[in-house]
Amino acid sequence: MRLVRISTLISIFLLSRQENLLNRECGLSTLGVHMHVLNPFHFGVVVSGNDFCNREEEIEELQQDIKNHQNNIIYSPRRYGKTSLIYEVFRRLSGEKQIQTIYVNIYSILSETDFVELYHRALFKSLTKTPRTVMEQIGRYLKSIRPKITVNPDGTYDVGIEYMPEITAAVEDIMAVPLRYAEETGKSVVIAFDEFQQIARIQNFVLEKKIRNIIQEQSDKIAYIFLGSKRHVMEEMFSNPNRPFYRAGKQMPLKKIDRKQMILFIIEKFLETGKRISNNLAEDIIGLADNHPYYIQHLSHIIWDLAENEVHADMVQQALDYTLNRESVVFTEFWDRLSLNQRKVLVALNLKNKDEGIFSQAVSHRFKLPPVSSLQKSLKTLYGQELIEKVNGDYQITDVFFRLWIKRNYTINPPYYLT
Ligand SMILES: Nc1ncnc2c1ncn2[C@@H]1O[C@H](COP(=O)(O)OP(=O)(O)O)[C@@H](O)[C@H]1O
Ligand SMILES: [Mg+2]
């Protein structure tokens, strides 16, 4: 009874908002005022604030962990929303004077020196406001690295390094900065290292152990968050007892966003911008995108552009066709580079029923798969390249549009080995 009333209230609320928004739009256009409404769906960029959907539980948990100086390891396939989640958590903490947040993306590092330089820049950009304060603070926080500050004509500034001692000393020096800052100001410091798996990709990165030791020494003062998308690399780094980062923090595998929240998000974004989409069509988008936030935003963005006021079913199809046609060049190139066995595996993974295993007789027979040993080899290669991922013990193709592209090509036009 109570539930019914609440859901009725919600729909009345949504409807009245819908009317309001549409009326506002009409009202303005009858007055001849041109209202330029921006597309509310964003993909390929960090989203936060109004553009960020839900994840309230993860946000709450992370905020608590940060306050308790608990280290965290967040991993998921690419584009699930790790970076956005950290930006949103940091945004919400920005009002708290006693907490200093620092975000470093180390995706581009190619060497240990790059690591020091990137971290150095991020630290001083976060901890200081002007070149003068950088200079004042550097003396206090750095012992051996000598920075260089360049002021740009527009008043912004860059922090670089003029002199760096040998790499171990440099790492020790830079890693101590947050602690020295915390001790001097009495603030809690939280540092997020994004794309942290890059550390493991640098050949002879002898510093993994060094960094881990320093982090451990700071464990009661500083909270570290490690984010990474190369899932198997991250798992290996943090779950293998022989690796320095073994159990360096609490593991938080990031899941997809709650489906119901995502539906509400889509409907609301359309409403806020004077357009309507039905619950069913919003669900269709989520179904096509396999509830993957990046692909939901991507499709919704195109559909929003197509719809003048109301979204119709054919627009969803049109948006999908448009996207697959546009990506087709890249996917074809991709496809050409795969071996025949790899292609068969991808088609099988894509077209088999959900409850069928890839190693089952039926699947092997239907898709003319190679013998188990070759099948395993193909799976391993595809997994290593992150073309496929493991979800609930089963493999699936990582890129949702690639999945749909394969499906489109191979259900209409089955290749010879599928007939
Ligand atoms: N909470 C969210 N609400 C809405 N869209 C999201 C959310 N998280 C991620 N996205 C969508 O996914 C895309 C990729 O997010 P991002 O944070 O860069 O993922 P990751 O860091 O895991 O690769 C964003 O550009 C956005 O379109
Ligand atoms: Mg990211």
Image: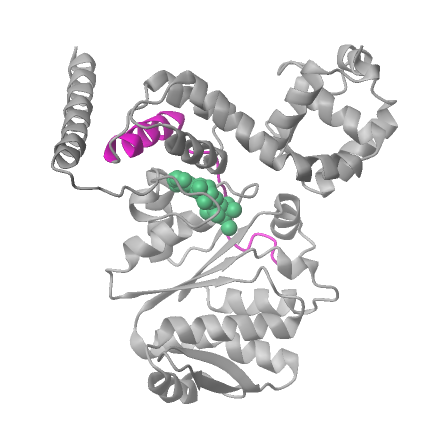
- Rendering colour mode: one colour
Q: Residue at x 26, y 66 (%)?
A: 98
Q: Position of residue 176 (x, y in %)?
A: 48, 76
Residue 268 belongs to the span the image colors magenta: yes
Is residue 89 visible in the rendered structure shown here?
Answer: yes
Residue 282: quadrant of the picture: top left
- Viewer-proximal residue among 67 and 413: 413
Residue appearing at x 64%, y 79% in the figure: 167
Quadrant assignment for ligand 1: top left
Specify the quadrant that holds the C terminus: top right
Question: Range of the magenta residues?
Answer: 245-272
Q: Position of residue 370 (x, y in %)?
A: 86, 22
Is residue 152 rendered magenta in the image?
Answer: no
Question: Who's the residue at 62% across and 70% down the image?
Answer: 210
Would you say 343 lies left or right of 71 here? right
Q: Is residue 290 visible?
A: no
Q: Quadrant of the N terminus?
A: top left
Percent of width and height locating residue 4: 19, 12
Residue 244 sits in quarter? bottom right
Eyeballing the image, is 82 above or below 281?
Answer: below
For the image, the number of numbered tags is 0
Q: Residue at x 62, y 16 (%)?
A: 354
Q: Position of residue 368 (x, y in %)?
A: 83, 16
